[in-house]
Amino acid sequence: MLDIKKIIVADHAGFCFGVKRAVDISLNYKKEDNGAVYTLGPLIHNDDVVNFLKAQGISQISIDDLDKLGEKDAVVIRSHGVTPETIRRIEKTGAQVVDATCPYVASIQLKVKKYHAKGYQIIIVGDKDHPEVIGINGWCGNSAIVTRDGSDLGTLPQKVCIVAQTTERLSNFEKVVEAASRSGAEVLTFNTICSATKERQGSADEVSKKVDLMIVIGGKNSSNSKKLYDICRTNCNNTIFIENAGELPDWVINSKGIETVGVTAGASTPNWVIQEVLARLEKGLETEQKELISAIAVDGKD
Ligand code: SF4
């Protein structure tokens, strides 16, 4: 008899609103359009989803290959958003722009544009190399100061407007606001951190404290999934990071010492990948408990 008695799926796990929306927009557009549909870079950091989209006829194009586009083609802007300059470059080719920028990110872009025009120095709290930050910076003519914690702000002009990358830590945002306020500048702040990240991290933290084994499902390049892994590992030494059900080690299913298993997934992990992992784990559950797993699996997503 195997030992797994309970599987707990984090309340907030898997696709966030913006990522799900971007995938839906791409698939719906492809259904209606005869031309080639591309995403500008991988739509999300998950190979299973990228391969699935490819099978539906939606492949990737890089910024350097835009001149290969034709008038019948379409380019999907992913949830991270892009600079207005990138949009203009696509439009110049004659291809359609399908904008799947997450509305939360689009709202930051508009704020940055508005307050830059009003003479504010824009400060973005985030990672200067992250596509979302590069895109936001484009909306103020690439003039923003990008900082992680405010330690490198230097001398500030009279008016500054602070926004955050949607996945930034609140503590970093607060540090930057504090540093800018000390400079004596007029400081306008917009806490633009998205609750999806906080909710996923909070649920992962909660579940990983209660289990013998924690499974984090996410793409190898997904920074938000890696962050979930770090959080879970702090609470549960027995935490593993897998991309899909195929990577679930046999020792988990056949283990004799694991009674409670927790499952969470990054914002770029689709529901079907989570379900496949749960289906494999189900083999470790006693027969009468199999219903429990499906009930949790459905309720556990947002
Ligand atoms: S994490 Fe938030 S801001 Fe980013 S794509 Fe998802 S819903 Fe949008």
Image (cartoon, grey):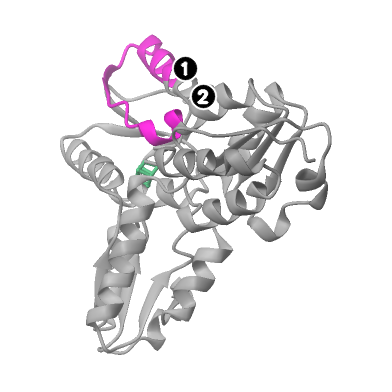
Residue 102 vs residue 244, the one in the foreground: 244
Residue 220 locus on image (x, y percent): 65, 53
The residue tagged 2 is: 149
Check disc 1 and give the amino acid type: Lys
The answer to whether residue 191 is left or right of residue 222 is left
Residue at left 57%, top 26%?
Answer: 207
Location of the N terminus by quadrant is top right
- Is residue 294 magenta-colored? no
Residue that appears at 43% across and 23% down: 173
Q: Residue 24 is drawn in which quadrant? A: bottom left
Q: Which residue is mark 1?
A: 175
Q: Which circle's residue, 1 or 2, is located before the other in the chain?
A: 2
Looking at the picture, how far across and down is residue 187, in whole percent?
28, 19
Image quadrant of residue 237? top right
Residue 275 drawn above or below residue 157 = below
Which percent across, then down, holds residue 300? 44, 38
Ligand 1: quadrant of the figure: top left
Q: How far separated are the C-alphas under marks 1 and 2?
A: 6 Å
- In percent of width and height, residue 292 lies at 52, 38
Q: Secondary structure at mark 2?
A: loop
Residue 148 shows in the view: no
Q: Which amino acid, mark 2?
A: Asp
Q: Which residues are magenta?
A: 174-199
